[in-house]
Amino acid sequence: MPNLRRPSEFQDDRPSRGKIAYRRFIRLLRPIILLLVVFGLFGGGSIILIRLALKQQYFPIREKIIQLMPLKIEKIEITGCTLTSKEEVMEALGVQKGDSILQFSVNDAKKNLNALPFVDHVLIERQLPGSIIIHISERTPFAVWQNQGKFVLIDRQGNIVNDHGMSGKDGNAFLKLPLVVGKGANLAAAELLDIITTQPEIKKRLVAAVRVGERRWNLDLRDGTTVFLPENQEEPAVQRLIRYQKDFQLLDRPVKNIDLRLPDRMVIRQNKTVAPNNNNPDTETGSQPNADSDTTSE
């Protein structure tokens, strides 16, 4: 059988197994090195640009780099909003989709968001290339409670929420929330305000809900009318009031008092300058508009 082995002079030209493995490793490593270089340049350029953005003398350089690196905001994710609307959050951010993400200031956004009435604190993440993630933690005021001449924010259970008085963002919170007045009003407010919330016609007119004797409510409306509600029967009384408003536009008339404490009738006391209206058969008024006989007493 002939000898098939190659001459020794040809065996020296054949690469060893180690060289072959090394060459394969180099071929695999080249794209990885290229990606690392690209990401390094990209990340380093972004960091340099952000630092330059903090120094006014580098504004022209920053603008040119931004033009070369057109990173746009593609996603704004907002979570944690209950009392704060997303429209208010977007206005405080001062940016929108399509704006440059590198020009977005996290510190300025935090400052603006923390100034909103119900915001306790906020977390903001800028995720390159195009996402801004915002999580808002809110305080939980439910209403404003006026008691013995003092105004405080309360939660749904009637507990006092820490605030800084009528100034700053707490002042805005006071203006946005319903007002309950009187001893014990903080503890009973949630049930009544839930009923009022379902009736926009009353909600938009309500100035304050006043607790009487820690057992029932009066509703003070914007035109000066006071509605007397019965004890533990607020929802049926409010439904009756809505029905009278729909049928007779009662809340649009110059009425001083509307007494709903009796289940089978409504007693009205009109302003002195207005003649009584007897068109409603379920309404009682006295012969004189300002007479005490046209009201009931507790």
Image: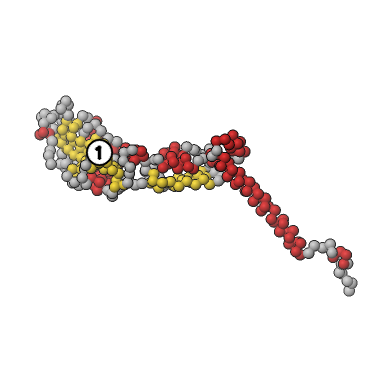
Q: Is residue 102 above or below residue 36?
A: above
Q: To which quarter of the image does residue 117 belong?
A: top left
Which residue has dot 1 on it?
208
- Residue 261 in which image quadrant: top left
- Secondary structure beneath label 1: strand
Q: Is residue 161 visible?
A: yes
Where is residue 27? Give x, y as percent: 72, 56
Quarter of the figure that contains the C terminus: top left
In the rendered image, residue 87, in percent from the top left (x then y), is placed at 42, 39
Give the quarter of the image for residue 259: top left
Q: Residues within 10 Å of mark 1 (few under 14, many from 20)?
A: some
- Residue closer to the observer: 57 or 43: 57
Compared to 292, does 22 lie above or below? below
The residue at the point 18 percent across, 39 percent down is 228
- Give the tally of numbered discs: 1
The image position of residue 167, as x and y in percent, is 33, 38
Going by the picture, which residue comes out furthest to the top?
273
Tell me, yes or no, if residue 196 can be seen here. no
Q: Quadrant of the N terminus?
A: bottom right
The answer to whether 194 appears left or right of 290 in the picture is right
User: Is residue 169 or residue 249 the one in the foreground?
Assistant: 169
From the viewer's perspective, is residue 244 above or below residue 13? above
- Image point (21%, 29%), residue name: 254
Residue in view at x 23 percent, y 36 percent: 220
Residue 98 percent location from the top left of the image: 53, 38
